[in-house]
Amino acid sequence: MSLGIFVMLVIILITLLVVGAVMYFGSQHDPHTNVRSVESSRAVQTLIEQQRRAAQKLALQQPKKNEEETV
């Protein structure tokens, strides 16, 4: 009985170590967690471009609202 419990604890311990190692090394190789990576840089550039276009669209819509209020 105690041998079975010992084997079970060893298996659980090994499993936890493997899961921890996979999580640690997986996060080290994830390009999205690195701020200086190419993928992160592209994502930031895309967001900046979307923000710029949204600001332009909003700026074009603003005068129309002001013209309607003055009439």
Image: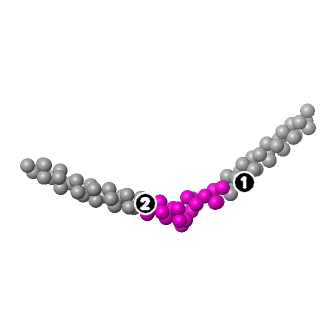
Residue 59 x %, y %: 24, 58
The image's mark for residue 4 is: none
Residue at position x 49%, y 64% in the image = 41
- Above or below, 13 against 62 in this view is above
Q: Which residue of the protein is positioned furthest toward the top in this rendering? A: 1
Q: Position of residue 9 (x, y in %)?
A: 83, 41
Closer to the camera: disc 1 or disc 2? 2
The dominant secondary structure in magenta is helix
Camera-nearest residue between 18 and 41: 41
| Residue 29 drawn in magenta | yes
Q: Which one is in front, 3 or 26?
A: 26
Location of residue 67 in the rendering, given as x and y in whole percent from the top left corner:
13, 52
- Alpha carbon separation for disc pair 1 and 2: 33 Å
Name the element at disc 1: helix
Q: Residues within 10 Å of mark 1 (few under 14, many from 20)?
A: few
Up-down relation of residue 55 to residue 2 (above or below): below
Q: Which residues are magenta?
A: 26-45
Residue at image mark 1: 21
Dot 1 or dot 2, earlier in sequence? 1
Q: Which amino acid type corresponds to the residue marked 2 in the rendered image? A: Thr
Q: Which mark is residue 46?
A: 2
